[in-house]
Image (cartoon, rainbow, N blue to C red):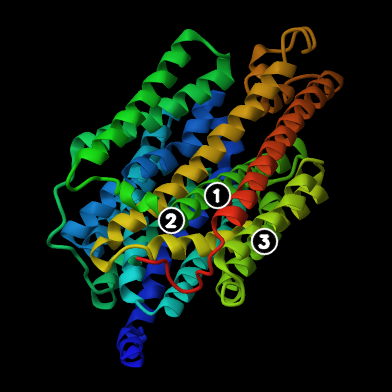
Amino acid sequence: MTTTLETTTRATRREWLGLAVLALPTILLGLDMTVLHLAAPMLSADLGPSSSQLLWIIDVYGFVVAGLLITMGTVGDRIGRRRLLMIGAAGFAGASLLAAFATSAELLIAARALLGLAGATLMPSTLSLISNMFRDPRQRQLAIAIWMTNFMLGGIAGPLVGGVLLERFHWGSVFLIGVPPLLLLLAVARPLLPEFRNPGSGRIDLASVALSMSAIVAVVYALKETAKDGLHLTTLAVLAAGLATGYAFVRRQLTLTEPLLDLRLFHRTAFSVSLGAQTFGLYVLAAMQFLAVQYFQLVLGLSPLESGLWMLPVAVAGIVGTLGAPFVVRRLPAGTAMTLGFLIAVPGLALMALSGRAAVVAGLTIASLGIQVVLALTYDLVVGSAPPERAGVASGMGETGTEFGMALGVAVSGSLVTAVYRGQVTEQTLPAGVSSEARDTLGSAVAVAEHLPQPLAREVLELTRAAYTDGVQLAALVSLGIIVVLAVATATLLRTRQRDTVES
């Protein structure tokens, strides 16, 4: 009976072709994150955003996605995951055009928020479709590894394509890259992708959606404003309101028959630890990648293309870790494999804290290798925990952890660097006669220095680049501490051998 079941649930040629279709939005999202990091200095010079606005441009996408992923997972269960994917692809293409031609920081932030709204439909749709198309556990592990590898391939293409575009064209060109792949997806999705829906899916609780979004935005806003202007009564009030809203959200989920967030899954140690490892593993990876690209351009003075090329070893190491994870977990318990991945990342982050081009590249490459092994395993544990009819909700929860971790990493690490920078670049430390704009961000300081006499410009750049480097080193040490905690957690809490599936 077991043999028959395995035979009937194994994927066919159509499913593997469908996986190729699902690669399109995944590659796009990986590429989009990389090229935006590369474009940050150029758009800063053009639009002149404040440090807070620049962080919002980078990560408002992730926070909107994080707040809506679970909602969109439920929507996909109701209206069909293929249909939701196609709606999201059309919306993402339109928002990309708006972002490409934004004329102010505020408009770009709004366009990025719309991209987040559309992106929230893409990721849970692709992951839940994979979980339904590949029911055989080992095929599903491989399919998820390939799906994640496509994200890394986008990361590899991003520095090359984005660097070339930024050398020759306006920064808005990086947003236009994704339009053709999305149009191709719209053309081939219907014949190659099956439709899945859950007719018994409950109604979407709009109050829960509002509560989750409000909690996320309030907490992040408080973090950003604290880094920018220090701790004030207003930011404390916003933080308290965000935490209270988050508590109200959790309480509401416990009372609903069809909750937006199925908290019962957190009773399983494997699910909760895996989701935590996924969220904070991506926090570290996104934070270090973002800061490394800024460090290359603003501190070392590399061009966008040169910065992108130096990031290639990081992306290649991530692909090796992702594709190697399914083979590692066949020989080691899941918890042991995840602990090993985190331990590999520890010396990498220690290297990054030393600064310098070689140390940053080598350190981030090592960290990417280890963390991507972990991420490939956590996705399978999260997705494999749900029955087919609830795959949209489960994948939405997994993707919420992903996007929230990435956005939180950029926001918190960026805020740490800003706090260190502001603490060292003050009216007292800046040379007399230098514009106060140099105190805002390193990008602003570089722009100010371009209009100063050479000796004065050199003095300003030495001060501000040293302050930024100190901030990056602090962020790397914080990330190192997080990885150590995650290694201990997976070693102690994931002791059972979970090679194929999570126990239902």
Three-letter residue code for mark 3: Leu
Seen as rendered, the residue at the extreme right is 455
Three-letter residue code for mark 1: Leu
Q: Earlier in the sequence, mark 3 or mark 2?
A: 2
Q: Eyeballing the image, is 41 above or below 52?
A: below
Residue in the foreground of this view, choosing between 264 and 173: 264
Mark 2 or 1, closer to the camera: 2
Quadrant housing the N terminus: bottom left
Distance from disc 1 to disc 3, alpha carbons, whole Å, reads: 16 Å
| Residue at the image point whose x is 49% and y is 71% from the top | 146
Name the side, left or right, on which 433 lies relative to 164. Answer: right
Numbered badge on residue 271: 2
Three-letter residue code for mark 2: Phe
Q: Secondary structure at mark 3?
A: helix
Q: Earlier in the sequence, mark 2 or mark 1?
A: 2
Q: Is residue 49 visible?
A: no
Count of numbered circles on the image: 3
Q: Secondary structure at mark 2?
A: helix
Q: Eyeballing the image, is 422 above or below 504?
A: above
**In the rendering, at what x and y percent does residue 180 appear?**
39, 62
Numbered badge on residue 282: 1
Mark 1 or 3, closer to the camera: 3
Numbered badge on residue 340: 3
Which class describes the residues within 10 Å of circle 1: few (<14), some (14-19), or many (20+)? Answer: many
Distance from disc 2 to disc 1, alpha carbons, whole Å, reads: 16 Å
**In the rendering, at what x and y percent does residue 362 appear?**
77, 55
**In the rendering, at what x and y percent does residue 222 appear?**
47, 22
**In the rendering, at what x and y percent does residue 113 appear?**
37, 38
Q: Secondary structure at mark 1?
A: helix
| Residue at the image point whose x is 44% and y is 11% from the top | 234
| Residue at the image point whose x is 29% and y is 77% from the top | 192
